[in-house]
Amino acid sequence: MTKIRLTEADRFERRHNGSREIRTKKMLDRIGVENIEQLIDETIPAAIRLKNPLDLPAAQTEHGFLKSFKAIAEKNKVYRSYIGLGYHNSITPGVIQRNILENPGWYTAYTPYQAEIAQGRLEALINFQTMVTDLTGMELANASLLDEGTAAAEAMSMLFASRKGKQKKTATKFFVDQHVLPQTLSILKTRSNPIGIELVVDDVAKYDAKDETFFGILLQYPNQEGNINDYPAVAKAAKENGQFVAVAVDLLAMTLLTPPGEWGADVVVGTSQRFGVPLGFGGPHAAFFATKDAFKRQIPGRIIGVSQDRDGNKAYRMALQTREQHIKRERATSNICTAQVLLAVIAGMYGVYHGPEGIKTIATNIHGHTQLLEQAVKAFGYQQLNENYFDTLKVAASPTEISQIREAAEAKGINFRYTTDSVGVALNQTTEMEDLLEVIEIFAAAKNADANAFDLQAAAEALEMQWPAHLQRSSEYMTHPVFHDYRSEHEMLRYMKRLENKDISLVHSMISLGSCTMKLNATAEMAPITWPELATIHPFAPASQTAGYFEIFRNLEAWLNEITGFAGTSLQPNSGAQGEFAGLMVIKAYHEDRGEGHRNICIIPTSAHGTNPASAALAGMKIVLVACDEAGNIDVADLREKAEAHKDDLSSLMITYPSTHGVYEESIIEICNIIHENGGQVYMDGANMNAQVGLTSPANIGADVCHLNLHKTFAIPHGGGGPGIGPICVAAHLVPFLPGNPLVAEAGGEKAITAISSAPWGSAGVLAISYAYIAMMGAEGLTNATKLAILNANYIQARLKDHYPVLYVGANGRNAHELIVDCRQFKPLGIEVEDIAKRLMDYGFHAPTVSFPVAGTLMIEPTESESLEELDRFCEALIGIRAEVKEVEDGIADKENNVLKNAPHTQAMVAADQWELPYSREKAGFPLDYVKAAKIWPSVRRIDNAFGDRNLMCSCIPVSDYAEEVEA
Ligand SMILES: *Cc1c(COP(=O)(O)O)cnc(C)c1O
């Protein structure tokens, strides 16, 4: 009889890790090692290897995980939250939820650096920019920031850096309306102090525009209580006295309110969350930053602009890239890198689907409901304190009434905002007449009034706008056809699909972006993020309703502590760069706490990612650079000399490990010791954590704090440039300083620094993805992933090294999880690394990282998720391209007119009746057989970046007007 054995049928690890068993053998042979252990031993220095396996719960199957995770999520209570404070429930149109938010064609795309294969998301982002520009009444907007609070801080720093003449010396104060959102204020405190800005928080009535010690003012419109103040007059006074005006607005209210752009504002910020993006317990949501043309070179983050391709066709690309922190480094005034692209795309699509009339209708309904509620509560004898409001009432109430209201509301599953003497009610798009009736009943009961005595129907028929005329918007917005053409679901579906089909994402081929770790974003990891138990929770809902989230945080923090070897984790930073800043601020607080607040020197290797020096500058530190030697390693002698020279005021070292050059530096332990001996702390940039998990750890190498890019190592998709999460993990002595939140006592350490992000746990709504990844991989799966990431990278090295020089390898000739191939030797032939990147598109691939950390090179990171077959296709593409370079070398191909210089080739070109290029159409469009089986065409030819920067346009314009605009 055949025996039956019960085994696990479907281990997730097998789905995540691309190459297993027999294939691994082939790869090991090619590399020239017996087994994977030998490869790892030859790659990672023995001194830093972990002695014990990670202590994590047993790996779950996909099915098992989803079942148990649902039970955790269900511990959250989904209430109707009318709390406001910058977060409002809204409705994600189904067609957008399914085809963007839940669609890997959108969420697995990379930041659109390779514009020719990113026209879809670039168009979606320019829609977002146009919508924001129009609604705020400004001249241009960027393609998102991380949250409203950090956007306000970016406005403050940009304006501070824009002071002119004698202002530079005298004007160091920034006036902040005392009614800005509390979380925004907390972030402003964090961000102002290190760079020498003094915040003055007070009643706007006390603001004296003539006071030359101020450089500007921040207003909140409507303010955090919901009141609409008459700010145009304040702004006028400020502008007349040469001061800057920043305004945080509610984007939806801009459909009805006169936007700040029409009353002189220099910067307008806010969140686009209520444009169809779920609450997610605080994020991720796309913040926006709109400003005047005069500031176009100072805007933080990425801006999408219009340019043209080689045939003069309209094409989009990221504009003004020369402003990025990579170039400015320690002179940067912002460290923003990853933003909130996927959420900006969703908000923009919400605008496309509803159009200006649609969103105005939504806003009008909300405002109408709010008016009805005001009339009702007044009829019951309450006083309503907001003179003018959009969607939020502040109802005065006695302590007894408040507790009665609260009890009744919670019994009905409703949250209001409670203070000691008032109840705040902020209505939203999901509020329907029956919800309104329930709210009315609750207020009536606390006054022993009869809710039915208020004639809702009659009141609804007699509604009128009450605001003073000059606050009522009369100007048009969103007039571009894109906001008018896609009203039926069919049209909308096809529009989104058309855009999606222009872009290369992980659904097509591997994206080997060195340092960015584009691994599998598994469907089972993504599924929970739209569950209402996670998606529909307000960040300031009472803790009694969020037990599920707390359990997720507790477990995930414990797992990340175990993986990094540290004692505590803060999930608050919502990008890697924010993690860097948070980590440095925690180090600063630690030094201050020990009476060593003068320590402000930060040592950074020259090879560091641009966000490192930018973050150190934002933390008010002085940067000392340390050189790298020829092998790409930190020059230890130089480091020692500098650490000793600055030992009295050394704050920290920022270091990436394995190095940005893709090598495990042997000297890392010595480096950390040198810093500690001289009184400094070691900050490890965790972008390369994929080369450490289970094999070594930041604590093990001697660091004190690190950030993790959950959107790299821990499977959160890149989203086309965000969302990201950048938690920091710290050693025990730094735990007390982890960042807090002004409204949520549970967040942060005992001596918490002020907020880094608006929400207490940052982008909590997508933490489920990393949670799922760890839960389903388990200790062994995660460790295998690291080994396979190293195997895959070394396999690529083995396949490519006869074709391209590989820069920087370790002592045994191995690289870590990524490798740098040199293309600089082709320069004399007129072939740039960019030509190779563009030619890869013809082969169906997105380029690896171009020119970081070394100009003229490609940094390839395959990750563990790619199969041998995919790695081979990619290597064959690069080898094919090398042969094309050789044709130029050998004089067979023309130096100017060749497949590389003309890349990428579009379908229109290859199918045109005319073909005059000196090579075949097949060679242009189908350079290898596998391409024929599944071709993805770039939708435009090579884009002219310089042209676009000279003729900067950051809003969508109809094709018909484009030629005119260019000529003008
Ligand atoms: C990605 C990356 C960062 C920045 O992370 P963001 O999430 O984009 O802010 C910092 N350092 C390195 C080495 C990186 O690769």
Image: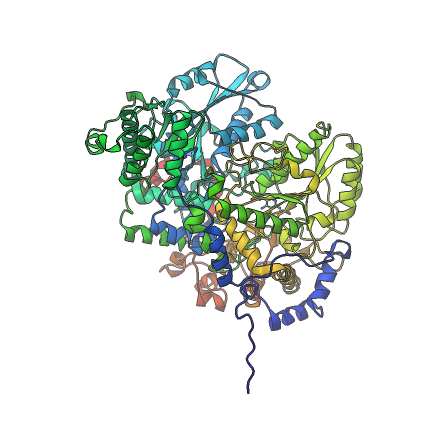
Q: Is residue 939 above or below residue 288?
A: below
Judge by depth and name the residue closer to the eye, 692 or 91.
91
Q: Is residue 826 visible?
A: yes
Q: Report the quarter where the C terminus lies.
A: top left
Judge by depth and name the residue closer to the eye, 925 or 797.
797
Q: Is residue 308 visible?
A: no
Image location (x, y in percent) of residue 186: 54, 30
The image quadrant that residue 640 belongs to is top right
Image location (x, y in percent) of residue 378: 29, 25
What is the number of callouts on the image?
Answer: 0
Residue lying at 55% horizontally and 85% vertically, measured from the top left: 2
The image quadrant that residue 541 belongs to is top left
Q: Is residue 879 above or below residue 407?
A: below
In the figure, is residue 642 to the left or right of 936?
right
Judge by depth and name the residue closer to the eye, 263 or 73.
73
Residue lying at 73% horizontally and 28% vertically, measured from the top left: 596
Q: Is residue 189 above or below residue 113?
A: above
Q: Is residue 756 above or below residue 556?
A: above
Quadrant for ligand 1 reads top right
Image location (x, y in percent) of residue 463: 23, 29
In the figure, is residue 887 to the left or right of 422?
right
The colour scheme is rainbow
In the figure, is residue 634 to the left or right of 527?
right
Q: Report the quarter where the N terminus lies.
A: bottom right
Image location (x, y in percent) of residue 705: 67, 42
Judge by depth and name the residue closer to the eye, 206 or 214.
206
Task: Spot the residue most to the bottom.
Answer: 1
